[in-house]
Each structure stands twice: as C-alpha cells, then as structure tokens.
Image (cartoon, rainbow, N blue to C red):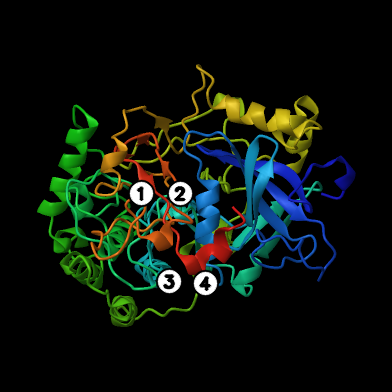
C-alpha cells in the first residue's frame, strides 16, 4: 500500500486497500492509517483511541439509506465496551458520499474458520481453552449492561491476521490491543446486542413472553425458542451449545426438516428440550464438565447473576482431570505440518469482513453436504500474489478500489442483488410488514436484528414521574425525540434460519451521562 497517491482516503487519514470480504450490510476493505507514528488523531469525537502509523485496519462500508443500517449501532457498542479485553477498537465512524463507514481493528479468522480447517472438530483441550476466553468476553459484555443475543463461532475472531505482499510473502501481525497474543479471542458484530438493565439504577428489564426469535437457531437457548425475553442466562446457554458443537462436530438438532420455518424453529426447540445435557456427551467421550455447564446455564433464573468464575473453573477442572494444561497451544497451530494456518493455503469463509478476498470468484459456491447448517462457501482458495496481479489487470475493481470509489462501492453492493447470482450473503432479505401504531410503542418495544442496541427495554412507567409525549420520563426527552420504525427482518442460512418478526416501533433511550459518547453520531 505504498502508492498512496492513487488510493482513496476516508476518515481523513485512512487509505483504502483491497477488498477482503462482504456481507449483507455492504463491503469491507483492508485499510491503513497514514498518519505519522505517535501523531494524534483528528480530534474528532468519533475517534476512540490512538492508532500508530501504517497500522492496518478493517473499513466497513454500508449504504447510508440501507433498510436496516447497523454500523452506527455497532460503533456505539464499541464505544461502550472500549478498553475491554477482546473487543476491537473502533477508530472512526462517519459518512463518505452515500455510504456509512466504520473503521476497526483488523483481525484474523473466526473460530468457525479455524474449526473448518481443523476437520470440523476441536480437541477437548482446545475447546476448554477457547471456552475460558469466550466466557470471559461474555462476562465483560454483561458487566457493561448488554446482552449479545447472537452467540455463534462466526462472531469470535483471533487476534493474528496475515497479509500477502505483492511479492507473495506472508506477514503476520496481531491487533494492537492484543499484547501480541496471536490467539487472543475477540468478539465482533454487535448488531443484535441489547441493554438488559438500566446503566445507572441497574434495574433489570421485565420478564416477557411471546417474543419473536432473535439469534441463530442452531445455538439459541430453549427459552428463546419459546418466545421468552432473553437475559444473561441465554447468552451463556448459547455458549454451551457452541462448546458441544466444537467437541462433537455437529449438534443433534442440525439438519431437521419441516414444511415451514415456524415448524422448524419449534422442532429444533423441542429437540433441545428433550435432550438432557448428559445425552450430548457422546458416551462419555466428552468431559462431563460441559454437561454441568449447560445444566447450570439452563437452571439460571431470568434476573439471576451468573457465577462466571464457577463456569471458568469447570473448564479448568476438565483440563486437570484429563491431564491437560492450558498452555496456549491450540489445534490450529498444528495445521500445515505444525506451521499453523496460512492465508495462502487455508480458505477464509467468514464474510463479516475477514473472509475470502473474492468470495464469488468464477461463480463457484458449494454447499456443505454434512449434517451441519453451514453457510454457502467458496471453494476457490485465496489467490497468490501473482494471481492477484493477473486479476487486477483484468478487472482492477476486484482487488483494489478504483479511481471512482463511489461508483466502485455501489457496484460491489449491487452485485448481491443480481438475479442470477449464486452467492447467498450471510444475512438476509427484508420482508416488509405493517407496523403497529405508535400507541403500542411503549408497552411492546421490540429489538429486531439491526435495531439500535443502545436502548433500554421498556419498564412500566412510574405514575409519580412526569412523562413527555412519548410516555417516557422527561430526563430522556433530549434523546428520545422520535420513534423509529424498523421493517421486519428474515434471516436465512443454508439450514440455519433465524428471524426477528417483531413489528412494534420503539424509541432510542439514551442516558444523560452517555451523551458525551453519542453526540457525535
């Protein structure tokens, strides 16, 4: 990325590089900070931390007039969680032409990618070490009054990333906040996160039923299947399902068939409810501590504080009783004859922005024929530097942003709407449904997939407190000055279908002490 004069600059000092992935929200490019080392950022309130010169970043683009914009909300999540271990830095959010952009740390492959490369099964040792980190990340999110609501391996990424130079050499680096730990696990994509309690009073949201599904059917909790309001216990139960997925290679409720999605959800939920956690141990081939974990998560009450230390201690017990150590040596470090994963060899299927540089090369998409609900994946390996150079001569827009960046971004975004395209994005088509009247907004607040997560779900209004026209306490009025309606979303993967069909309007609710964080947006 030395020819900066020919590159497009966004966010004042970030040079846009090659495309590295795309998703339902838009396109993601690799980028680079071009400020001198040690120089401060622009001073914009959008910048959340200092970044060194030539530091690589990930730059997400989405149309400003998207039906379900999510980058602004994702940026707010990163601001709330700023400084937490395993949460990427968000350096900038703003507008470039007709697009919103979000600039965050460049990270490595997801746990789903690594799981795929390791033969779709992790050892007990790797699963225990990964589980300890994942529990710790979820604890940090819960301590900041948020629940995640979409736990899945795709949203956990490791720190180490690799870049392929024009000479074909692979350079390895780690995210700046990882303290050079290549296997530090990060959580990304907070589009479905939601506040479960008031940040000031710590008052928990009320228990509700008849809620629409939110999350990924393969991993979501039993309570979510039955329409119950989610809380911290549901994130932890979803983690338990992920752990068994790593250990078994698949879950018993994968590949279930039904005439329609509603019946399929019910069938998956009933299967989860029918199976005792002990039944998932595969004849004691899996440490029993994982069944104990899942039993504990399912036994938690709606507002109960989880004992995260106890859950982590279960993983330590599983290691100790099987004569294993938490030595930081993971299964993926044995790939390629002990050299570890390599960008020139291993495909990166994650489309959240850390995926195949050309996910639809030659129109090759294949479906995983196993019993697992995998996404549509590209069979084309990551091209070498020579192949990239050849592709660049044929179509410069495939590997480098063109001289007309706005046209290029628009072209990339429109590709997903081509009628004959075989590419199925990770998320989602929009289904328009009628909205309920504004009179229902306060008692029936919903949180669809890409809703602004920085909301506090409705609590019964206190009749002694004065309210404004939106039936909110007056100290919210500066921020809750309008209702925002979101269309119903439907999300479908190959065999995993998850949806949010709640159509109620809802209000932004920000707190006075948070205005310094959000006034820039």
Label of residue 435 in the image: none
First in sequence: mark 3 vs mark 2 = 3
Marks 3,4: beta carbons within 8 A: yes
Measuring from the top left, give residue 38's x and y in whole percent: 81, 71
Q: Which mark is in front, 3 or 1?
A: 1
First in sequence: mark 4 vs mark 1 = 4
Q: Is residue 390 left or right of residue 376?
A: right
Q: Which residue is mark 1?
A: 470
Measuring from the top left, give residue 98's x and y in whole percent: 66, 34
Q: Is residue 226 left or right of residue 517?
A: left
Q: Quadrant of residue 277?
A: bottom left
Residue 442 visible to the viewer: yes
Measuring from the top left, give residue 53's x and y in whole percent: 80, 63
Measuring from the top left, give residue 78's x and y in whole percent: 53, 61
Q: Tell me the element at label 4.
A: loop
Q: Is residue 61 left or right of residue 188?
A: right
Q: Gap between marks 3 and 1, in whole Å?
A: 32 Å
User: Of residues 69 and 36, which is closer to you in this image?
Assistant: 69
Mark 2: few, some, or many residues within 10 Å (few <14, many ≥20)?
some
Residue 344 visible to the viewer: no
Marks 1,2: beta carbons within 8 A: yes
Q: Which residue is mark 2?
A: 481
First in sequence: mark 2 vs mark 4 = 4
Q: Tell me the element at label 2.
A: loop
Q: Which residue is mark 3?
A: 140
Q: Which residue is mark 4?
A: 84
Mark 4: few, some, or many residues within 10 Å (few <14, many ≥20)?
some
First in sequence: mark 3 vs mark 1 = 3
Q: Tell me the element at label 3.
A: helix
Q: Tell me the element at label 1.
A: loop
Count of numbered circles in the view: 4
Mark 1: few, some, or many residues within 10 Å (few <14, many ≥20)?
some
């Amino acid at each position: 990325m030395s020819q900066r004069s020919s590159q497009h600059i966004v966010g004042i000092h970030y040079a846009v590089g090659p495309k590295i992935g795309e998703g339902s929200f838009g396109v993601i490019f690799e980028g680079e900070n071009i400020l001198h080392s040690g120089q401060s950022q622009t001073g914009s309130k959008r910048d959340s931390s200092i970044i060194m010169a030539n530091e690589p970043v990930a730059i997400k683009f989405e149309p400003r007039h998207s039906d379900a914009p999510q980058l602004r909300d994702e940026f707010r999540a990163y601001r709330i969680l700023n400084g937490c271990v395993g949460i990427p830095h968000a350096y900038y959010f703003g507008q470039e032409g007709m697009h919103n952009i979000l600039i965050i740390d460049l990270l490595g492959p997801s746990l789903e990618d690594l799981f795929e490369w390791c033969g779709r099964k992790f050892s007990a040792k790797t699963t225990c070490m990964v589980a300890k980190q994942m529990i710790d990340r979820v604890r940090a999110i819960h301590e900041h009054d948020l629940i995640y609501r979409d736990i899945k391996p795709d949203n956990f990424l490791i720190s180490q990333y690799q870049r392929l130079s024009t000479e074909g050499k692979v350079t390895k680096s780690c995210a700046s906040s990882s303290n050079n730990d290549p296997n530090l696990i990060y959580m990304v994509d907070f589009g479905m996160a939601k506040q479960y309690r008031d940040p000031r009073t710590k008052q928990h949201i009320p228990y509700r039923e008849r809620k629409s599904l939110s999350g990924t059917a393969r991993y979501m909790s039993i309570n979510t299947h039955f329409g119950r309001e989610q809380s911290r216990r549901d994130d932890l139960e979803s983690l338990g399902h992920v752990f068994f997925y790593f250990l078994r290679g698949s879950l018993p409720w994968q590949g279930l068939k039904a005439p329609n999605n509603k019946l399929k959800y019910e069938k998956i939920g009933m299967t989860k409810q029918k199976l005792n956690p002990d039944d998932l141990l595969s004849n004691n081939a899996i440490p029993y501590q994982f069944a104990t974990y899942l039993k504990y998560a399912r036994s938690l009450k709606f507002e109960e504080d989880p004992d995260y230390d106890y859950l982590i201690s279960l993983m330590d017990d599983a290691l100790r009783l099987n004569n294993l150590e938490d030595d930081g040596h993971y299964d993926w470090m044995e790939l390629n004859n002990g050299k570890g994963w390599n960008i020139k060899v291993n495909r990166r299927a994650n489309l959240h922005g850390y995926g195949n540089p050309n996910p639809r090369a030659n129109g090759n998409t294949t479906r995983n024929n196993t019993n697992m609900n995998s996404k549509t994946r590209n069979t084309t390996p990551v091209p070498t530097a020579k192949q990239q150079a050849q592709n660049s001569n044929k179509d410069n827009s495939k590997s480098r942003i063109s001289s007309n960046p706005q046209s290029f971004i628009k072209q990339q975004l429109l590709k997903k709407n081509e009628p004959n395209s075989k590419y199925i994005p990770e998320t989602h088509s929009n289904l328009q449904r009628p909205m309920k009247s504004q009179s229902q907004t306060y008692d029936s607040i919903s949180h669809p997939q890409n809703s602004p997560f920085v909301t506090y779900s409705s609590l019964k209004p206190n009749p002694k407190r004065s309210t404004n026209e939106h039936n909110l306490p007056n100290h919210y009025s500066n921020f809750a000055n309008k209702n925002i309606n979101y269309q119903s979303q439907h999300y479908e993967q190959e065999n995993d279908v998850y949806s949010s069909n709640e159509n109620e309007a809802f209000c932004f609710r920000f707190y006075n002490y948070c205005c310094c964080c959000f006034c820039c947006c």
